[in-house]
Image (tube, rainbow, N blue to C red):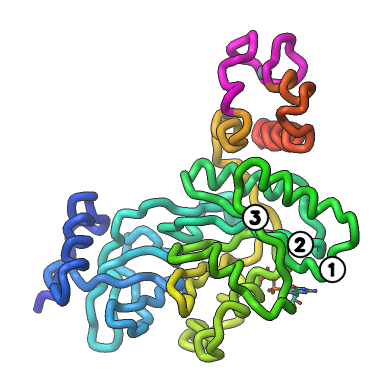
Amino acid sequence: MSYTSTMTKRRLTDQQARRIQAQRSSEGNVATETGQPGVVIARYGKQALIETRAGDRLLCHLRAHLESPVAGDEVLWLPTEETGVVDALVTRRNVLQRPDAQGRLRPVAANIDLMLIVFAPEPAPQANLIDRYLVAAENMEVEAALVLNKTDLLEPEDKLAKQLDRYADLGYRTLATHRELPDATDMTALIGQDTLVLVGQSGVGKSSLIQRLLPDASIRVGALSEVADKGRHTTTTAELFHLPGGGRLIDSPGVRDFGLTHVAPEAVFSGFREFSPYSGQCRFRDCQHQSEPGCALTAAVDSGEISSERFESYQQISASLATT
Ligand SMILES: Nc1nc2c(ncn2[C@@H]2O[C@H](COP(=O)(O)OP(=O)(O)O)[C@@H](O)[C@H]2O)c(=O)[nH]1
Ligand SMILES: [Mg+2]
Ligand SMILES: [Zn+2]
């Protein structure tokens, strides 16, 4: 039987991926030779919860040596006697990665349209965390938007509201919200039909935001009801949710720190989008943008074209790369 045969190539070439896309778009024509298309809802250890094209959910095993699938990944799976097995990973458009406790880079979520960076008055934002996420987003070539959450806890004249405005001035979409607001249309307008990943410090309200957008309690319980040993996995895995109006949200697990050890210094520069007009404008080609004469960036800070907060943030992130 075809489903017992193993594919020689686990990872699909772009051409194969396009073929699968084509097959998916032509009604009812499932690729029997290469398995059936599915999307990863969440990965739990050596298994992945897959949603089939028919909308069924299936906890699948993973073929050995298969690159680790994560929430948002497109896969091909094959039925087995008990459940199924993920046989191949469709080439990703992009992948959000971050280092684990041992400093190894791990995929978190794939095929993202928009990164929603959530911050709140409580817990107070870590220095530079928003900018580190923005660097990651710019380098993934994924649009980023900022959500100031828990505005019910905002003090009058709170500097976080001004910070949000500063990001809006840079051209990022922004939103201020909290969980008691009766209507979430501004959130749903932001999401549209896209696949979003929510990132931010643990405790800023990412999971609560998603719950607010999901009307049905049974969806809320979500994938975890189908997996044994829930406690251990809730804190370590990302999970994909479908919204009633279309659009998909990926909740990413809490992280204490989002290190950017895996990016090149030039990538940090290009992660600060307002710096691009000054690229290559410094007197010295190898300018470190610290206190060199003729530095175009420091001149732009002095003239107010670049905010000193962002410039400081850039310097701190750059310095953190140098020491790791
Ligand atoms: N005051 C206030 N608390 C909130 C709000 N949203 C969530 N919380 C609380 O913040 C805590 C962390 O929320 P959670 O959604 O688990 O955060 P996550 O770690 O980012 O997923 C919980 O105790 C929530 O009840 C909000 O809009 N206002
Ligand atoms: Mg959470
Ligand atoms: Zn410079």
Tell me whether circle 2 and circle 3 mark residues in contact (CB < 8 Å).
no
Nearer the observer: mark 2 or 3; the answer is 3
Tag on residue 153? 1
Residue 271, placed above or below residue 62: above
Q: Is 294 inside the magenta-drawn segment?
A: yes
User: Circle 2: is it few (<14), some (14-19), or many (20+) Cα within 10 Å?
Assistant: many
Give residue 174's mark. 3
Residue 98 image position (x, y, % from top left): 56, 52
Check disc 1: other Cα within 10 Å, few if <14, some if 14-19, many if 20+: few
- Look at the numbered discs 1 and 2 and tell me whether their residues touch, using CB distance below 8 Å: yes
Q: Is residue 198 left or right of residue 292?
A: left
Could you say which disc has been placed on residue 120 in the image? 2
Task: Provide the residue span drawn in magenta.
Answer: 276-296
Query: Can see residue 4?
Result: no
Magenta segment, prevailing SS (helix, strand or loop): loop
Q: Amino acid at mark 2?
A: Ala
